[in-house]
Structure formats: C-alpha cells, structure tokens
Image (cartoon, rainbow, N blue to C red):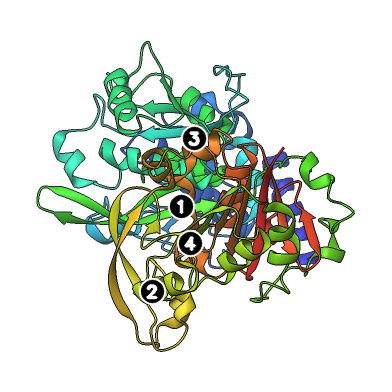
Amino acid sequence: MKKAFFLFIITSFNLISGQPLSRAVTYEPSPGRFGDNLLSYIHAKWVSYKNNVPLLYKPFVCSDQLLMHEKEMHYAMHASQFRKTKVLDSDVLDDANGNDPTLYIVPYFPESEWERGAGVSFSGGVWPFFQTGWNDKKFIASLSSVIAPKESLHFQGLPKDKITVAVHMRKGGNNDTPATLTQFPLKFLPNDFYIEQIKKLYELVGCRPLYIFLFTDDNNPGQIAENIAAGVEGLPIEINYRKDGNCDTANVVEDFFALKQFDCLIHSESNFSFIMSHLKDYWVSIYPSSFYKNGSSYVYDTINIKQTPYPIYGNPIPEQVASLKDKFRLYTDSPESEKMGYGNWNHFEDGEYEVVIKHFSREGQVIVDAGAHMGDWSDLVLQHTHNNCRLISFEPVPNFYNKLCNRIGNRAEIHNKALGREEAYAIMNYYYVESEGCSSLYERKVLNDIPVKKIKVPVTSLDSFCVTNKIDHIDLLKIDVEGAEWDLLLGANDMISQRKIPVIQFEYGGTYPDANITLQQVYAFFASRGYAVFRITEDGLIHIPQWRAELEDNHLSNWLAVLD
C-alpha cells in the first residue's frame, strides 16, 4: 500500500512539475466511429489505472465534447519526451529504465470474442487481447468521471409509470457499406431479434408496461418503429424514436448519454452501447454473443441477459386477509420469519389446508386446481366445501388423470390437459419410475439420471378455457405445475388483469431455474396487478411488502397472491 501511495505521489509530482515522465501509456486510434475509439481509450485507461502510470490522451471523433478532453494529459504535449515506444499485448508493464523513457501503446482490439476470432487485426495478424476491469467498481467510477459530457445535455422526459427501455440498433447509416453489414452479424442485428428480446424483457420485468426508445443510426427510424410495433402488437408497449434529423453523424454524444437514463438496455455488440452497458447497472441488459447461419439468415443462439436487483414495491395487506388475523398468524418479512414456510410437502402441515383451503375456499365458489396430480388438494377442497363448489381440475399426465377421475370424478370437472400460454401441444417429461410428482413440461436438471418418458399432452390457456366455458370469475386458483407457472400466468393474464381471480396459490422452487423463470418476475407480475404477495407457513402468512433479492433461493415453498 505504501509503495502504491509513493508511486502516486511521484506520478502526481511529475504531472504538476512538468518533469520528464519515465513511462506513460497511450492507445492506437481506431478507424471506426465514436464507440470504437472510446473503447481504445478505455483499454489504455485500464492499463494506466492498473499500473499507476499516466495516460496520454489522443483526441478522437466527438471526444472534445467530453470531460476527458479537459482532464487528461494530451498526447501531443508530452509524446516527444519518450525515446522508446512499446506496443502492448497485455495489461502488465515491464520495469522502466529512468534513462530510457518508454511510451506504451495499447493497440485497438474488440471486446467481442467472435469478432476477435473471425477477423484480422489492423496490423494483419491476430487481435491482441487482455481482460479489462469491467467489474472493478473503482475503475468504472474513474471512467465515469471523465466519460461525461462537458455541457449539460437535455433528453426528453421519460414516463414514471412504465419500465423504460433503451434499444440501440446499429443499422449502418451512411457510414457502413453493405459488405460491413454482412461481415459483422453481431453488430448489425435484424429487427426480429429486437422484437424477440423486447418480448423477453417484458416477461422478465413481470409483464409491466414498457416505454421503448429506439436509438439508431438509420436515416428512417420511423419505418423501424412501425416494424417493431407490429411485432409486439397487443402488449402494453409504447415505442418512440427521434423524429427529426436522425443519422449516423448526428446526436452521437447526446444519444450515448441518453442511454444512461433508462432502466433497461437491449443492444448489439456495437461498442457504442456495449460500453454503456458496463458504465451503468441496468435492471436488465440483453445482447447476443454468438450465432450460426441457417440458410440466408442468422440464428442468435447465445443471448446474454444481465439482471441487477431493482425496486419492486408490493401492495398492502388486503382487508380480506387482515380480517382473518384471529384465524391464523400474520408475519412480517423479517429475519425471524426468514426460514419459515419452506420444504414441506404435506398439505396439512405446510399451511395449504389450515390457512388457504380453510379460509379462502367456501361453498358455492368456482375453484380451479391446475396441476391436480392425484387429487389430494382437490379432495381437501371438496371435503371442506361439503362437495358444494364448482371444482375444475386440470391434470395432463394420463396416469395421474385416471387416478384423479377414480377419486373425485363424480364430484368435480376434470380435464386431461395442461394449462399454459395458448392452445397447443407440448411434451411432458414423465418420470415414471420414481419422482412421478416431479413430471414437468420442462426437463428437470436434478433428475437427469432417472428414466423419463416423453408424452405429448394438450395445452390450453385459462383465458381461453374461461371464454369457451362462460366462466366470468374464479374465486380461488391453485397452481402447482412444476415450472410452467409463468406460462400459466401469461395464459391467464386477461382474467388476472381484470381482477376476476382474487386469490391465487402458487408453488415456487427448483423447477423455476429449469424453466428459466424467476420468483422476482412472478412477484412483479402480481404486484403490478394489485395483488399483495405472501409466503405460506404452517400456521399463517408472511407478507412480502417489497421484493428483495434474498427471496430468490429456489427453496420449495407455497405462496399466495391476494387482491384487495
């Protein structure tokens, strides 16, 4: 520590006194645009930061609009004092000889692994590469202090009632040739890619309304916006773009820093947006990193999705729950309740009967059991309501369906179907030797060594089922569908959003990562639709007033969402 401090003092003394420098670092300019040159600067800045040596700044396109232009030492003023130059192939500097001042040069190289492997460097050989400290918070803070506008920039106000999403679409503008567009398929992405990722992000944030702004170098962003809008039609997504004066050379700095104002980012491997994705912790950022060619088109098979915790506020305890405080315990989300409500499969001991069935199911109600298995939960509901409710049970596995019919077939409506997003057929993984109850529409990673049968099963959505069967409300919905919970919720979105299902019990656990879903998105889904969310315990409910990352633990548990 003392040595590093001593070096800092010596370096600072040299900068202030004007004495000759024994060594410094600079960078090779890129023939590309703003993002490429900014990346070169960042690579050299990392070497400077890591080795505690001065950086000599070379101006590049638009850099005179940034604070670095004022704060950094300029190359032109200091380069002549160095007798020796050395091109780097790593971020480690050798020991300098004070009598032989050395200027180290960081050559340009792309961050994209595919681009480094597919092309040749500016010098004709393989690209050099070293890891940059993108995860070093102090380094990122130092970057942000100089990669900042010299003058205040004013971007239009963003809505407060929607998740805001910046979509950076590099299309080539007037700068890139048709050959360049085909040479870099990870930088120049088709509109269909963005449509698919917007839909994915919409689900990741719990199907909350989105505000999309298209940042593009295209001369006709309106046409792109129309295409994107058509692709997400029917979803609560607003799309906007710069209406006047849009081209590849206009508003470069303004657009770069405007990206930072958004909650989420979808981008290509363009350096312009790749850099901003590391300068800001977006709630969700999405970009592709590999592809393969299928005929004349590209399939992007590796999609990088980075998520950081963000505030999701729940809803207060509804009156119908508060009024039951003398019937069961109401806990607050606290360290004392942290481990409650986990890992119990017994309906009598895990709160499903004592809390949910006894207090939220009544005679005359419409009750749906999605994932009825062999009928344990359904039978308890029928017993509690004295067979005087309309119970509708869904079970897609034929073996379970037959046993369900034998058990309650004369007291309930039973359907040999799965509930999902839409009318379709799907493949059920039926673990017939053992762990039958873990059978799922998604492959269970923990059951890889257990024999499985692939069964084709019919799927319907709850919304479609309700329309067909003229069901205008469901009093209680129980969901235990081994990872297909999210698909079911999307297929019931109309009923849920129209407040026609006031109480919903759902399971959470290890099936969620198998299905590539999270409890966070389910929580956000319910919270944005007016539901208070609880974890069920053996003797009550734990109210979760705000999302916190520690809840995403994949421990088996049952949850309850209740409308006010």
Residue denoted by label 4? 131
Question: Which quadrant is home to the C terminus?
Answer: top right
Please tell me how crowded label 1 is: few (under 14), some (14-19), or many (20+) other residues with Cα within 10 Å.
Answer: many
* Residue 335 image label: none
* Kind of residue at badge 2: Asn
Quarter of image, res 118 = bottom left
Q: Residue furthest top?
A: 244
- Of mark 2 and mark 3, the one earlier in the sequence is 3
Question: Which element is circle 3 on?
Answer: helix
Closer to the camera in the image, 78 or 342: 342
How far from the left and from the top, in percent, is residue 543? 78, 52
- Of mark 3 and mark 1, the one earlier in the sequence is 3
Quarter of image, res 170 = top left
Residue denoted by label 3? 76
Q: Residue furthest right?
A: 326
Q: Distance between the Cα atoms at labels 3 and 1?
A: 63 Å
Residue denoted by label 1? 488
Q: Nearer the viewer, mark 2 or mark 4?
A: 2
- Of mark 2 and mark 4, the one earlier in the sequence is 4
